[in-house]
Amino acid sequence: MYFSKLIATGACVPKTVISNQKLSELVDTSDEWISSRTGIRNRHFAQTENASDLAIGTARQILSRCQIAPEDIDLIIVATVSGDYTTPSVACLVQAAIGAKNALAFDISAACSGFIFGLSVADKYIRAGIYKNALIIGSELLSKYLNFNDRSTCVLFGDGSGGAMVVRSDEPGLLCEALGSDGERGLSLTCGHVPTSSPFNGLPRGTDPYVHMDGRVIFDFATRTVPKSVEEMLEKQGVGIEDIDLVVPHQANSRIVEIISRKLKIPMEKFYLNMHEYANTSSASIPIALNELVENGRITPGMTVLFCGFGAGLTWGNMLIRM
Ligand code: UT7
């Protein structure tokens, strides 16, 4: 019987940091409003890099931290909703850049749950005995989709990338998961709409690149669906709250995390927050946080870590990991 285990992490974010104060010079907002409503203080915005450059930076860092040669990678999954192109995928661009010539590479679109969806797909390939070494990355360049005249969205998001190497193992590493989707509420958070048009239907060409969001719908969804899904998952697995060493939630809003903490009765001290530095980086937020925890020694081998992803789609992805 095969299991999958996470053996190395990495991250790559653009150097340029934009503070709430800096944003307030552009749009009618304030540091006070943004930080008290969301916990966000800074975000990193790309100057020239695109989503693939950040993903490649992450991939190279992960490779430098494990004993796996590029040609031994079987699978590359990049979770992204802000890739460089509609096609080729960011995963194929990563494959070429790192020389992973034997890998199957593709992107998945599950927004802020994307990294967890990617881990889940890799886990199935590994458990089925098809692949041994999978590189999973979340990479987003959301700044290119933000409307800097819309204060209700442009203050919330940032650019970044993070990821992990997941390999075949004799012991369980990815312990259990609860993933889901609710397409009925999908249009409450959209990004990058390309309408139908051709010379034969007379419809005008034009795209709406921007993020549009009904924040309250997403807030309500996240604070109801995530705790319920986590509770059901843990109960099914026979895992108690006390068995969880750390929680790495999606970094959208500290108030959402506080409500999740209260509902799950897991103390806030066990939740890792870094949205004050990166804002919401969608699929990259969980792996960037995970990488920081590994780098600063707060996550060590043997620890049990809960990931909670949620966002556009709508989608959610919760997963319990033994490091
Ligand atoms: O990755 C997952 C995707 N997204 C999320 O998880 C976001 C989930 N939602 C949220 O985090 C919150 O709903 C927000 C942070 C987006 C908004 O917080 P809120 O407490 O729901 O605020 P609101 O949208 O109800 O707006 C309250 C007020 C409004 O003014 P009025 O109508 O009360 O006068 C807004 O116009 O705040 C105003 N406002 C702002 N003021 C200053 C909205 N954005 C801003 C801003 N600066 N940036």
Image: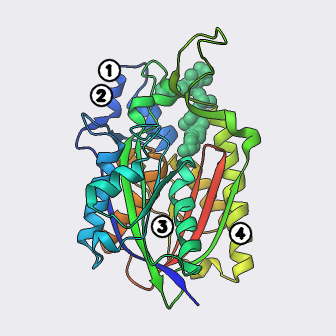
Of callouts 4 and 2, the N-terminal one? 2
Say which residue appears at 27% left-offset and 44% top-offset: 14
Answer with the quarter of the image where residue 214 lies.
top right
73 up-or-down from 213: above or below: below
Residue 164 lies, in percent from the top left, at 39, 67
Which mark lies nearer to you, 1 or 4?
4
Q: Which residue is mark 4?
A: 231
Distance from disc 4 to disc 3, alpha carbons, whole Å, reads 19 Å
Looking at the rendered structure, which numbered label has been put on residue 269? 3
- Quick one: SS at disc 3? helix
Tag count:
4
Along the polypeptide, which appears first: circle 1 or circle 4? 1
Task: Point out which mark residue 22 bears.
Answer: 2
> For the residues marked 4 and 2, what is the alpha-carbon distance in whole angstroms?
40 Å
Type of the residue with mark 1: Glu
Q: Indicate which disc residue 16 carries.
A: none
Q: Which mark is residue 25?
A: 1
Disc 2 CB within 8 Å of nearest ligand 1 atom: no
